[in-house]
Amino acid sequence: MKEFTVEETSDFSLGQLIEIDENLTGKTVNISGISIGKGFAGNQKRNNFRRGPMTHGSKNHRAPGSIGACATPARVFPGKTMAGQYGNQKTTIRNLKVVQVDKDQNLLIVKGSVPGKPGNLLTIKTSNISKTS
């Protein structure tokens, strides 16, 4: 499913179940996964653009408006925010607090939302934040 780099491979065997460590309770983790895909979306939904004027004969209600400069570059620069595929990309939710670890069922309970649909493959790493309080 996924490959990870480890220092010593003699500790693992083929098909071994990797269990959760109990000392994670109260610590923070970063969880990465593929976000839910939302299909093709326009500029208002995807990039939080404002709409055009609705009255006085305007026909620019949900259109993106001008996208390029004058004749000098004569092109649209890469990375221009436009309509397109929304969601379905790798997302990392940082600093989620681990509330509880269930060793019997091998469950990790975190406070907050995780990316993706139920059954999505997630990568969990401990976060390296220092608390200053």
Image: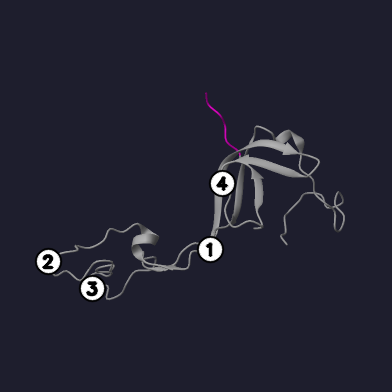
Instruction: Write down the region rendered in magenta.
Output: 128-133
Viewer-nearest of discs 4 and 2: 2
Tell me the CA gap for discs 4 and 1.
16 Å
Q: Residues within 10 Å of mark 2 (few under 14, many from 20)?
A: few
Residue denoted by label 1: 88
Q: Earlier in the sequence, mark 1 or mark 3?
A: 3
Q: Which residue occupies the foreground of this view, 91 or 130?
A: 91
Look at 22% across and 63% down and name the residue there.
52
Q: Is residue 63 magenta?
A: no
Residue denoted by label 2: 56
Tell me the CA gap for discs 2 and 1.
39 Å
Tell me the CA gap for discs 4 and 2.
44 Å
Residue pushed farthest top? Answer: 133
Viewer-nearest of discs 4 and 3: 4
Main secondary structure type of the part rendered in magenta: loop
Residue denoted by label 3: 72
Residue denoted by label 4: 113
In the image: residue 24, left or right of residue 68: right
Tell me the CA gap for discs 1 and 3.
36 Å
Q: Which residue occupies the foreground of this view, 7 or 100?
A: 100
Q: Which residue occupies the foreground of this view, 43 or 58?
A: 58
Please tell me whether mark 1 sits on a helix, a strand or a loop.
loop
Determine contact: label 4, label 1, CB under 8 Å. Answer: no
Q: Earlier in the sequence, mark 4 or mark 2?
A: 2
Quarter of the image for the N terminus: give it: bottom right
- Residue type indicated by callout 4: Ser
- Residue type indicated by callout 3: Thr
